[in-house]
Structures are given as C-alpha cells and as structure tokens.
Image: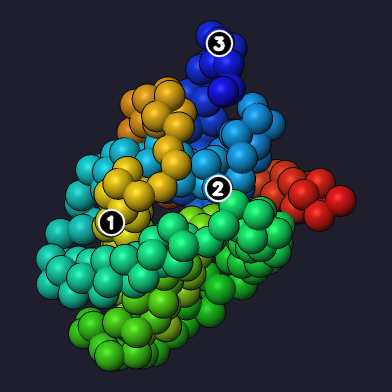
C-alpha cells in the first residue's frame, strides 16, 4: 500500500495541470505525468491506467476552449470518434491481458518511441501544412489510421496526440489549429473508452485520479487557450529529455 500524503497529492495535482496543458499545446504530457507517478512508487501498469483516468478531464477542458475551431466539424468528430473508440477497445483489451512484468519491460521502448515522435513534431507540422490529401472528407485510410492510433492510445497514451495529428494532416486539408482541436476531441474519446474499461477491469489508484482530474481540466482549458502563442520548442525539448531519462532509468 502506497502512503499518500499532502505533498504527494500536491505533486499529482501539479503534474496533472502541467501534463494536460502540454497535451493541449503540443502533445506528450504523459511523458511528464507518468514518470512522476513512478517516482511516487506506483507500479508501471497502475501508473499508466491511473494516469489515463486522471488526465481525461484535460481533453474535455481543451475541447471546451477549442469550441470555435471545432465549429463545422461534427461529422468528422462522429466518424473519427467511432473509429478511435473501436481502436481503444482493442488497446484496452490488450493492456488488461498484459502482465505487469511484461508491461514494465515494454514501457521504456514505448517511451522512447513517443519521445522520437514528439521531437519530430515540428517537421511533421511543416509537412502537414503543405499536405494535399483527401480534402474535407474523412477517408477510409484516415479511419484506419485513427483506429490504429486508438489501439496505441489505450495501451499507452504518450504520443497519441502526435500520431493523431499526423494522420489528420495527411488526409484532411485544413488549418493546423482546427486539426489540433479535432485531435483533442478524438483523444478524449479514445481515453474515455479506455478509462471505462480500466475502471472495470484494471488496477486503478483512485487517489491519483482524484488528485489529477480537477487540475487536468483547468490545464487542458488553459493550454488550448494559449496554444496559438506559447513558444513550443523549449517545452518540447524539456519533455523529450525527461522522457528519455525515464526510459534509460527503466532500462537500467
């Protein structure tokens, strides 16, 4: 049993706020919140599922803040939400059938992959801004990519936003801000489905969820509000370095 004191609760709330804001800004917030939960003594599997539930309100806050950019995207939200939800069910099933030892062995490599995705995000964004794909319509390849991202996001959420933004930009011609808003809603659906599955069938540390969730909502709302202004490069560098350090520690 992990002892939870006032300092631990404050750390969880603070990292929930920061991670949700980072998810709204650039993606990769889990690369900060997951290591903090590990440092507080939670096993990797418990930290992962609790982190998913704790950060879920952050996506809701971000989507509320991005409501102007979401205008006119209801059909996209519906189709991609269904595909993401289907993928999330698959990912949640895989995670609940994975032993804690196996998950801990896989986690460092998932973190490294997420760090590489986040580091490559500026290049992806530049290419996406020049992309000429399927116009405004949701195509079959986009739905397939969205479902695959849902599987990954439910199994281990770090880097989900980067994957989704890459898929959306390849197949939809739209502004990066509108695609970022769409990414946030689909991420919310993926994590929401996973959260329900985890609440039923996975080891959740509910004290983590209670501490992180309210702060995450505020962080997501604020992060989306400043996403157009904040310099993202320094933030991205810090998150990537933290993630790589955690991966190295887990490997050793």
| Among the 4 quarters of the image, the one containing residue 131 | bottom left
| Residue 222 image-quadrant placement | top left
Q: Is residue 29 visible?
A: no
Residue 190 coordinates in the image, percent (x, y): 32, 60
Q: Nearer the viewer, residue 83 or 118?
A: 83
Q: Quadrant of the N terminus?
A: top right
Q: Residue at x 44, y 42 (%)?
A: 203
Mark 3, residue position: 5
Residue at 28%, 90% (x, y): give it.
140
Instruction: For marks 1 and 2, give the one nearer the viewer.
Output: 2
Counting from the top left corner in percent of width and height, residue 157 is at: 49, 56
**Which residue does the numbered mark 2 point to in the structure image?**
45
Label 1 sits on residue: 193
Measured Cα–Cα span from mark 1 to mark 2: 17 Å
Is 124 in front, or is 98? 98
Q: Nearer the viewer, residue 112 or 46?
A: 46
**Residue density around tag 3, few if under 14, some if 14–19, many if 20 or more, within 10 Å:** few
Considering the numbered disc 3 on the image, is that residue within a helix, a strand or a loop? loop
Side (left or right) of 42 relative to 130: right
């Amino acid at each position: 049993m992990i002892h939870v004191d006032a300092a631990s609760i404050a750390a969880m709330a603070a990292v929930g706020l920061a991670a949700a804001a980072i998810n709204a800004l650039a993606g990769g917030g889990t690369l900060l919140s997951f290591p903090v939960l590990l440092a507080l003594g939670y096993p990797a599997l418990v930290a992962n599922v609790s982190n998913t539930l704790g950060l879920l309100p952050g996506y809701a806050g971000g989507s509320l803040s991005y409501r102007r950019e979401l205008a006119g995207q209801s059909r996209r939200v519906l189709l991609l939400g269904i595909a993401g939800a289907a993928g999330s069910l698959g990912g949640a099933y895989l995670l609940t059938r994975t032993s804690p030892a196996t998950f801990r062995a896989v986690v460092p490599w998932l973190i490294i992959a997420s760090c590489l995705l986040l580091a490559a995000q500026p290049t992806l964004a530049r290419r996406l801004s020049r992309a000429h794909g399927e116009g405004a319509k949701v195509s079959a390849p986009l739905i397939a990519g969205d479902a695959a991202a849902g599987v990954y996001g439910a199994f281990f959420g770090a880097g989900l936003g980067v994957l989704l933004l890459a898929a959306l930009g390849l197949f939809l011609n739209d502004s990066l801000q509108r695609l970022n808003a769409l990414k946030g809603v689909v991420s919310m659906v993926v994590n929401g489905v996973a959260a329900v599955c985890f609440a039923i069938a996975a080891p959740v540390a509910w004290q983590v969820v209670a501490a992180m969730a309210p702060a995450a909502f505020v962080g997501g709302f604020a992060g989306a509000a400043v996403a157009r202004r904040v310099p993202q490069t320094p933030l991205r560098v810090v998150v990537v370095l933290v993630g790589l350090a955690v991966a190295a520690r887990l490997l050793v």
